Amino acid sequence: MKSRKIWLSDKEINEIYNLIKEYWEKHLKSKGVPLPLLKKNNKYTKDALVLVYLARNYPKNEPVTKKELTEFIRKYFPDVTDVQQARHLGRQKGWYVVSSRRKNHLDTLRERKLRFFDDSYYLVSLEEEYPGWTPERRKGISTEDFEKLKKLYDYRCATCGSKEGEPNLKNPSRITDLQKAHLNPHRAGDGYIPQCEECNRAYRDWFVFDKKGRVRTIADARVVLRADEKVQRDVYMILKSKFERKGS
């Protein structure tokens, strides 16, 4: 996919933002999803610009490469090197934005006959919040408390044991960077564990973990779609048998 260089005029930015605001007021405001300010101190905010760019032509918008998005943001923030706002808008702030690097929600993209390119983002909906997101997730865990948590785990990933600042055990070409991972993506109050980027990217949103970093149960039923057809059919038959016995 060739990186497009799309310039939006101030008028277009305002029009798209107002469209987003209309959807937000009707569908997302009551769910606690925060609407980013378009401007602060008479300057566009990164969150608003990212959301506007992803929402172009909504609801016929398409996936946007990270490179393309970064080039757009650099028009307003020349020193930016790595745009993280798209990912944060989804997982931390509730906007239904998905990333190709996490390879989740691929079923939604297939249904819409969209192709997801490497390192790209897609705004799935302005009417639904990010799956599993709740207002409580915004509170998160403070930097100070996360440092204490990492110390309890000897600065190692709870799941694979990779140590912060050292080569990752799963991917030795990368230096381990510990991230805040929810024990249960649907209940922020259950707490956190430190996970390396490799584990966090692979498992996040799909599973519920215990405090030893082990998978305890499924958090998102769509994870079964990642299995081969035989496993999917086995799961179907097991559940069909269970609910038929219950008469439901």
Image: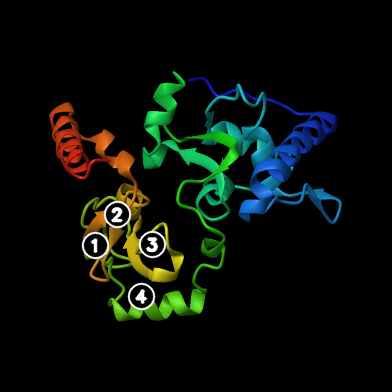
Task: Using a 10 Å C-alpha cutoff, classify the residue at mark 2 as few (fewer than 14 neighbours), some (14 to 19) or many (20 or more).
Answer: many
Mark 3 / mark 1, whichever is N-terminal: 1
Q: Are marks 2 and 3 in contact (CB under 8 Å)?
A: yes
For mark 3, what is the residue?
Answer: 181
SS for dot 4: helix
- For mark 2, what is the residue? 199
In the displayed structure image, the side of residue 51 where residue 135 appears, left or right = left
Q: Quadrant of residue 16?
A: top right
Q: Amino acid at mark 1?
A: Thr
Whole-Å distance between the Cαs marked 4 and 1?
A: 13 Å
Question: What's the mark number on residue 159?
Answer: 1
Circles 1, 2 touching at the beta carbon (< 8 Å): yes
Label 1 to label 2: alpha-carbon separation: 7 Å
Q: Amino acid at mark 2?
A: Cys
In terms of sequence position, does the residue under pointer 1 or pointer 2 come before the other? 1
Mark nearer the N terminus (2 vs 3): 3
Of residues 4 and 218, the one drawn nearer to the viewer in this rendering: 218
Task: Give the quarter of the figure containing the C terminus.
Answer: top left
Q: Is residue 33 visible?
A: no
Element at label 2: helix
* Residue indicated by mark 4: 150
Q: Earlier in the sequence, mark 4 or mark 1?
A: 4
Q: Pick whichever, 232 or 69, lies toward us.
A: 232
